[in-house]
Image (spheres, rainbow, N blue to C red):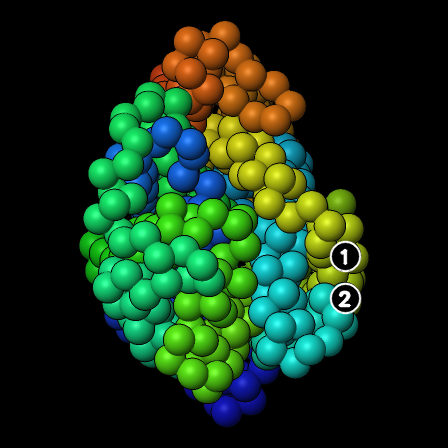
Amino acid sequence: MSKSNFLIERHSIDFIPHNLRHGKASDLIFLWFGANAQMAVVATGLMAITPGFSFGWAVLGIILGTLIGTVFMAYHSAQGPHLGIPQMIQSRAQFGYYGAVIPLIMVVLMYLGFYASGAVIGAEALAMLFHISVGMSILISSIAVLLLVLAGYNIIHRFNRWMSYFFTGIFGVLTIMLLTGVPIGHAHASVITHVSHGGFLIGPFLLSISLAVINTLGYAPYVADYSRYLPQKTSIASTFWYTYIGIAFSNMWMMILGALIQSKAPNGNPVAGFAMLAAHLGPWFRVLVLLAAALGIVSINALNIYGGFMSSLTIGTTFFRKLKANLGLRIWFIVPIAILGTYLAFLEKGNLLNSFESFLGLLIDFLVPWTAINLGDYYFLRKGNYNISDIYTPDGQYGKINLIALSSYVAGLIMELPFMNTSLYEGIVAKWLHNGDVSWIIGLVVAGSLYLIFSKRKLDVTAKHKATRGSQVGHVSVPRS
């Protein structure tokens, strides 16, 4: 690979040629640990602690949710080396060339929501560090994110490797301080006291599981974007496990830290809590903690803008097929997405925690049916056999609109309704479960099952029809040149 290709990425939603494939599956553990070991994940763990619900049960819920949710996310990652294309453009193989626009719009909104909430958290750290306004801090963070995204794939990988080392050291020290009972402000209670306080509550327990599932599954629409440059011979197992370990370990660690700091000193602001805790080692460590908080948000928000611009570019090229995915077009799509995300961050800064919680609740209900359809198609229906050229044309074998996929997606959403618990709507089953939310399980099962059953019948009918006409039916493969 040339130096210019390393420093500035020139590809976007197109197939990555084999002569540009590079790296090892083990690189993914650093990418995903560095991206996920940050304050937005800590803030998610903070929401797992509710009055009367014990810290110990919250930890168990976080662990279970992480172990479950990361399975789906890591299986999406394993598609990248084989297909060599971004995750969401591959959805055309399930939803059709134009039908894929529906989940694409959904994930663009998801990227922007994550970006806005994360940007506010990072801006609070910068504001405390440099004694500037939160608004100015949002602008500084956004400029750093923009530069990182403009550089692209390789620099993002390299940046997150460096950050994984830095975050491990910083959060390692903070964890030891919390576990040894170092006070946060005026809170002097030990961890043991809070572990034994409260008890089991079904609603909060299901919430803690759902929060962990949401946080890991939220990476699913763009996780393969960061494995698509790996050599095609990279095994599914290695891609899966290195992704899984990077996310699972960081997610459990950060969410449990959030739950722990909330149980010791409830204030709804993890950045302020960690800053007070760090001050016990001296001003120098407080500076490092705030720097880690700010850089962590830059890391994850670069991924959000990177995924947002590629999904937006996919939507644009769907209707304007003459657009060519080159370096100039990358910039034209990256900059507006970054500006929009920054604008939303300014709107978000006044009511961060409430809006973030509402956003997460809605996210999982729209994301789960898509992930069930995508994974079912790749691993059970087509078993990894795709014609990449046909994905880029409405006249290919995947068609313009796949009504089976869209109907399965909508059915999954509808069947989730009685099980939902969001700030906007609470289903009847969720009320029975004392505000517990298991809608993600229903969405997975319903959407995935319907898609597989009816798509399998359609493929069988097509195969029989071709056989009667003397056509040979076989698997299509990814192009190798």
Query: In the picture shown, does residue 127 fall above or below 85?
Result: below
Instruction: Say which residue label 1 marks.
Output: 346
Task: Identify the mark nearer the N-term, 2 or 1.
Answer: 2
Name the residue at 37% across, 80% down: 281
Q: Is residue 132 visible?
A: yes
Name the residue at 62% across, 52% down: 117
- Marks 2/1: CA distance? 7 Å
Residue 125 rendering spot, x and y as whole percentages: 59, 69
Disc 1 element: helix
Query: In the picture shown, does residue 166 fall above or below 215?
Result: below
Q: Quadrant of residue 322?
A: bottom right
The image shows a total of numbered marks equal to 2
Residue 345 rendering spot, x and y as whole percentages: 72, 56
What numbered label is drawn on residue 259? none
Instruction: Answer whether labels 2 and 1 touch (C-beta < 8 Å).
Output: yes
Query: In the picture shown, does residue 442 fall above or below 276?
Result: above
Disc 2 element: helix
Instruction: Say which residue label 2 marks.
Output: 135
Residue 470 rendering spot, x and y as whole percentages: 37, 27
For badge 2, the amino acid type reads Gly
- The residue lying toward the viewer, choosing from 443 and 323, is 443
Q: Is residue 28 left or right of residue 370?
A: left
Query: In the picture shown, does residue 259 fall above or below 369?
Result: below
For badge 1, the amino acid type reads Phe
